Structures are given as C-alpha cells and as structure tokens.
Image (cartoon, rainbow, N blue to C red):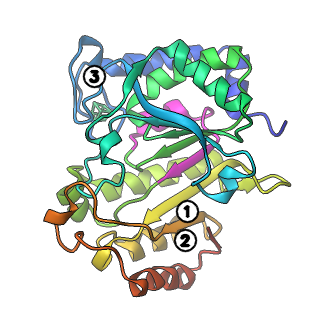
C-alpha cells in the first residue's frame, strides 16, 4: 500500500463528515462551480448543470485509456458521472454529459462502487466530471473510508470549479486533473455557455496547485499526489493553446505534468460550428507541442 491519501487523514479526524455536510448546505444556493447559479437544489431546483440533490452515474470500471501514471498495470478506477457544468458543442462524451445517459445511485452504493474498484486492484478512484456532485461524493467518501478506502482520489474535471468548491476539496483530493479547454473566455462562452471560463480556470489551476503541488509518482511510476493538466487541441487554435500552456509554465510550474491531447473528433453539434467540423491536422498538433517546449514545459504525457 502506498502513501495515505489526504481524505483518510480528514476522515480519521472525523472531519470528512462535517465537510460533506458543509458542502450539502451549499446546495441551498448552489455555487459549486463558476456558474454560481444560486438555485436551491435541495428543494428540487436545477441550475445550468440540471443536477439536483441526487447523484447519477453512467458506468464504472477499471479504465486503461487514461494517462500511464494513472493506469499502471491494474487500471484507473473510473466512475463516469452524468451531466456537466459545461455544455461544449463538441462534447466528446455528449451521451453522458448532455443527454445524461445514466442512473441514480444511493450514497451507500456509490461508496460500494469505490470499494469494489479498489478491491479490483485499481490504483486510484477517478471521478469523471464530478464537480456538480461534490457534496454527494464527499458523503459517499465518508462511508467508503469506514469500509477501508485508501487509494488516491482523482478529480477529473473541466477547470470551471468555484473557489467554494475548491475550498471544500482542500485536503480531500490527491490528484487534480482539470481539462483546461480554452485560453479565451469569449470563445469559451460561445462554445460552452460558460462565462469567464479562462479567468475561472486560471484561478482554479492556481488553487489546485497550491493544494497538491506538482504531480508526484511512486517507484512504480504511479501518481499519488499533484496536478495533472489536460488540454485538447482544437482546430484552428480555438482552444487558445498558447495562452493555456504559457500560463501553466509561467504561473503554475514548468514541472506541471501536461497531457496535450490530439484525439479531437467532431461530435455532438460540432458539425454546425466550423472549423470544429473536422479533426485537427498533424501540423496543428505539432505546433501545440512546439509551443509547450518553447514555453518551457518539461513533463509532457
Ligand atoms: S454545480 Fe454549477 S451549474 Fe450546477 S447548479 Fe451549481 S453552480 Fe449551477
């Protein structure tokens, strides 16, 4: 067994339950992401993400398609949550995120799933698009701790987390994995419906890095704590790649572990939004890598 995850220390101090309760209270005027809708989800109202106080998942299991530092030999214990606080017109998982193809689970069941993934040997619990379910996840985590959960928690999110959400996650999350989608808020607003995306993402990155630092791996090459940033290159530089990578190198750390992704394909409504109606070219991807090296990033996945 590796390093003790942060959340276990919180649980041993009997503080995780209180943290979950505090998070749940925020649902009365939800500000868990930078939309800050202010709706009362406990009373059944729904904001931009359309989630109320229940938690829904689409699927779970050991996943081998993530970064090597998460997958190792036994897989990343991935739980896909339904819905999203961003509405990207090109969403690569739109059936889960937009169509909310999934089912409700109890907190007890969610905790059992985490334990099951650990029992199957997964190196971590990888929560995909978790932010709008933050209170429910903390409650389930409290239950899972009692059942012996002890692998790192990966917060696999969209970078649009609010200050309130990140404060609640401080000391809970070991590995933050934001997918930083845009380096220009006007482009982000047009393609996701999120206002001030880039400013929110910059604040979130700074806070995530303050909490967990650069990504650290054990002697087997498996990540156990730190920041891992994803960035999907989009056609005709719609992702604002240079702004994103330069900010990471200069304001976060040149040792930030960054996965510059090349797998963009036109999905969901992308065909109505050229140039998103095509894949990226080899030249566009090479240019992103060149920028990463130019700005001084040293750890590219
Ligand atoms: S999680 Fe974000 S999008 Fe969903 S209701 Fe709360 S503030 Fe709005």
Tell me where residue 134 appears, x and y as whole percent.
Answer: 45, 29
Q: Name the residue under label 2.
A: 249
For the point 30% across and 14% down, the residue is: 42
Q: How far apart are marks 1 and 3 (CA)?
A: 31 Å
Are circles 1 and 2 on residues that touch, CB within 8 Å?
Answer: yes
In the image, residue 226 sits, relative to residue 295, either above or below, namely: above
- Give the Cα separation between the discs numbered 1 and 2: 6 Å
Q: In which quarter of the image is the N terminus?
A: top right
Residue for badge 1: 252
Residue 93 appears in the figure: yes
Q: Say what secondary structure mark 2 lies in.
A: helix
* Closer to the camera in the image, 154 or 210: 154
Q: Can residue 34 be seen in this view?
A: no
**Which span of residues is magenta-colored?**
161-178
Q: Which of 129 and 267 is in front in this view?
A: 267
Q: Is residue 262 left or right of residue 121?
A: left
Q: Distance between the residues labelled 2 and 3?
A: 35 Å
In the picture of the structure, the residue carrying the numbered disc 3 is: 29
> Mark 3: is the Cβ under 8 angstroms from ligand 1?
no
Looking at the image, the residue that sits furthest to the left is 272
The answer to whether the beta carbon of the residue marked 2 is less than 8 Å from any atom of ligand 1 is no
201 or 56, which lies in front?
56
Between discs 2 and 3, the one toward the N terminus: 3
Q: Is mark 3 on a helix, strand or loop?
A: helix
Residue 250: x and y in percent read 53, 71
């Amino acid at each position: 067994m590796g390093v003790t995850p942060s959340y276990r220390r919180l649980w041993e101090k009997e503080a995780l339950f209180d943290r979950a309760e505090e998070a749940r209270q925020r649902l009365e005027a939800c500000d868990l992401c930078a939309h800050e809708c202010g709706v009362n989800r406990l009373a059944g109202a729904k904001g931009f993400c359309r989630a109320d106080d229940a938690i829904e998942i689409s699927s779970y299991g050991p996943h081998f398609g993530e970064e090597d530092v998460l997958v190792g030999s036994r897989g990343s214990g991935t739980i896909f949550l339904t819905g999203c606080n961003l509405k990207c017109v090109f969403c690569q998982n739109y059936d889960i995120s937009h169509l909310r193809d999934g089912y409700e689970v109890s907190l007890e069941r969610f905790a059992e799933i985490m334990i099951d993934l650990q029992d199957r040997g997964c190196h971590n619990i990888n929560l995909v698009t978790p932010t709008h379910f933050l209170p429910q996840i903390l409650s389930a985590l409290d239950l899972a701790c009692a059942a012996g959960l002890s692998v790192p928690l990966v917060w696999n999110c969209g970078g649009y987390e609010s200050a309130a959400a990140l404060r609640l996650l401080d000391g809970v999350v070991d590995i933050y994995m934001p997918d930083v989608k845009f380096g220009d808020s006007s482009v982000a607003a047009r393609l996701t419906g999120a206002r001030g995306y880039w400013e929110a993402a910059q604040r979130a990155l700074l806070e995530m890095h303050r909490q967990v630092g650069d990504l650290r791996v054990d002697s087997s090459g498996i990540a156990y704590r730190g920041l891992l940033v994803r960035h999907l290159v989009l056609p005709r530089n719609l992702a604002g790649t240079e702004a994103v990578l330069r900010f990471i190198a200069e304001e976060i750390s040149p040792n930030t572990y960054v996965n510059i992704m090349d797998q963009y394909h036109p999905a969901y409504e992308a065909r109505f939004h050229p140039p998103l109606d095509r894949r990226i070219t080899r030249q566009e991807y090479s240019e992103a890598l060149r920028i990463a090296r130019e700005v001084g990033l040293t750890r590219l996945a």
